[in-house]
């Protein structure tokens, strides 16, 4: 049984959405490393400038693809149904005397 086996489907969806939000923040942080305001104290309006990204576009693409792949893999693990046990069917147990219903 998975660690999420006791969760109902609604709780599993909440975990998957929360994981997606966390990975969104991680991806945003990783792809924006080195970007931001730089320069000296803003004595003049032109003394500070914004650098849009310090990471190449293809590196950003790779980071996002890896994070999306990780989210999909973990989501499939969390959302998959409970494994069926062989021989465990939904029929009620037969009476104790062994006669069929």
Image (cartoon, rainbow, N blue to C red):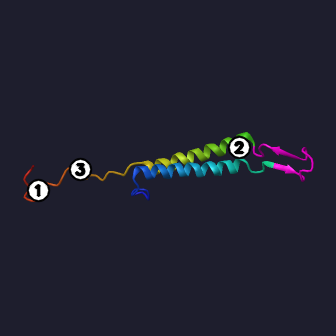
> Who's the residue at 69% across and 50% down the image?
30
Helix, strand or loop for disc 1: loop
* Crowding at mark 1 (Cα within 10 Å: few <14, some 14-19, many 20+): few
Residue 33 vs residue 10, the one in the foreground? 10
Image point (17%, 55%), residue name: 93
Residue 57 spot, x, y in % from top left: 73, 40
Residue 95's disc number? 1
- Going from N to C along the chain, the mark reached first, 3 or 2, is 2
Identify residue for label 2: 59
Disc 3 designates what residue?
90
Q: Would residue 23 appear left or right of 2 to someone viewing this image?
A: right
Instruction: Report the predominant secondary structure element of the magenta stretch.
Output: loop
Rendered view: 73 above or below 98: above
Q: Earlier in the sequence, mark 2 or mark 1?
A: 2
Q: Which residues are magenta?
A: 37-55
Q: Are marks 2 and 1 in contact (CB under 8 Å)?
A: no
Q: Position of residue 48 (x, y in %)?
A: 87, 47
Q: CA distance from mark 3 to mark 2?
A: 51 Å
* Relative side of 12 to 69, left or right: left
Q: Earlier in the sequence, mark 3 or mark 1?
A: 3
Residue projecting furthest to the right: 44
**Nearer to us: label 2 or label 1:** 1
Horizontal and vertical percent for residue 29? 69, 51
Give the quadrant of the N terminus: bottom left
Magenta-span inclusion, residue 54: yes
Please tell me whether mark 2 sits on a helix, a strand or a loop: helix
Horizontally, residue 11 falls left or right of residue 65, namely left
């Amino acid at each position: 049984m998975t660690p999420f086996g006791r969760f109902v489907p609604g709780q599993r969806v909440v975990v998957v959405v929360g994981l997606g939000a966390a990975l969104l923040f991680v991806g945003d942080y990783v792809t924006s490393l080195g970007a931001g305001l730089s320069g000296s104290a803003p004595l003049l309006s032109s003394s500070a400038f914004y650098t849009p990204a310090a990471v190449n576009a293809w590196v950003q693409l790779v980071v996002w693809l890896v994070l999306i792949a990780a989210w999909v893999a973990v989501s499939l693990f969390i959302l998959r149904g409970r494994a069926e046990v062989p021989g465990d069917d939904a029929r009620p147990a037969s009476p104790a005397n062994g006669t069929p219903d």
